[in-house]
Image: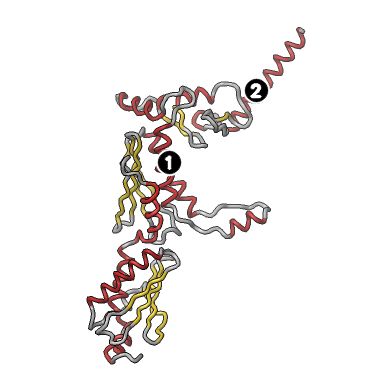
Amino acid sequence: MKLSDEAEQELAQVESVLKPLPNVKLEARLDTTLRFQVSFSAKKTLILRCHLPEGYPASRLVAEIRSKTLSQKLTDGLAQLAEAEAEKATGGPQVTRTVAFVHNWLRDNPLCSAAEEIAEIKSRLLDKQEGDRLKLLQAESRVQLTAAKAGYRLSLQLTLPNDYPESRAEVELLSSNLPSSVSRQAVARSAEIARRCVEPPSYRGKDKKLRQQAAAWKPSPCLLPVAEFAFSFLRSCATQRCPVCDKPALATAAAATATASSVEDPADQLEFVACGHLYHAGCLKAYMTSPPYSPDGKPCRHAGCGQPVCHERFRTSAKVLESRWAAQQAKERELAEVADFFN
């Protein structure tokens, strides 16, 4: 199909007109189809094909967008928006206007690289009846998550970098009505999840399979894992009871905080152990510093858990517990020898 002189003139000037857009590259022109690559990062890269119909530019072009990293639903919707933008320029330079529109849309919507995660959070995690919220700040590339359960609330903000998920997202606390020790722990563990998504695991062993897995590791998105943790964390905390005193963990800590004149009573603060379960600080200290001891640490007292617990704050690390266990065993042997002597 032969294009009009006006169309040929426009296409001849496409590269020079789009030169101010460094993220756009004209890859090929095949007859009446132009192929562009628009890329802001490895995650935000797409291929735009502009198909010129007979009678162009009096007829509207057809836009086709494909991407290996963005969802098809998103690219199909963007293609429809691009065609609507091209229709506004019918009779004029539709190609440059369409490419500029797609470029600006990717630039102004940095959260598009997390579109699938955002959709998953909305469909699976949010419970609006409880008060859960998800707020998107496109201009600032930020996502605000609010989890609510049984009157408690935890709001986290994630700032996604331009090359997300290759670089780590920043996690910070927006607001919370939880005890301060619980809020700090939630933010710290969320940040740790975000860090592990972008930092490769270190493996120096001889196992060939594990070595291959470490070599093939790639950064992974962290928004969904952090959201899953935040919602499950709050809902778990809201229903957990201290396994030592069998009182509701959050309710007791919140009541102690509300009645405190200036600072929280350290014994009423909440402490987390490695397996993620909650204890009142006073109960945990009493449990960790009392016999009997074990060389592997004391077992978590939450029902069905039993994982070894160590806690540096109370000077009950694995090494200390092992030494206490050794002293306990020595004392038991001494008492047994005395008993045997008198028997």
Residue 100 spot, x, y in % from top left: 30, 74
Determine which of the numbered discs, if any, sits on residue 327 in the image: 2
**Residue 36 position in % (x across, y down):** 38, 77
The residue sitting at the top extreme is 342
Left/right placement of residue 217 relative to residue 126 reads right
Left or right of 294 on screen, residue 282: left
Three-letter code for the amino acid on which mark 2 is drawn: Ala
Determine whether 226 is above or below 148 in the image: below
Judged left or right of residue 261, residue 28 is right
The amino acid type found where label 1 is placed reads Ser
Dot 1 corresponds to which residue? 232
Q: Position of residue 170 (x, y in %)?
A: 39, 51
Task: Tell me if I can see residue 8 in this picture.
Answer: yes
- Res. 309 visible in picture: no
Q: Quadrant of the C terminus?
A: top right
In the rendered image, residue 311, in percent from the top left (x then y), is placed at 52, 32
Q: Residue at position x 41%, y 79% from top?
A: 27
Name which residue lies at 40% across and 73% down.
47
Label disc, if present, on residue 177 of the rendered structure: none
**Residue 184 in which image quadrant:** top left
Label 2 sits on a secondary structure element that is helix
Q: Residues within 10 Å of mark 1 (few under 14, many from 20)?
A: some
Closer to the camera in the image, 122 or 326:
122
Residue at the spot 56% in from the left edge and 52% down from the top edge:
201
Q: Nearer the viewer, mark 1 or mark 2?
A: 1
Image quarter (top left, top right, bottom left or bottom right) of the N terminus: bottom left
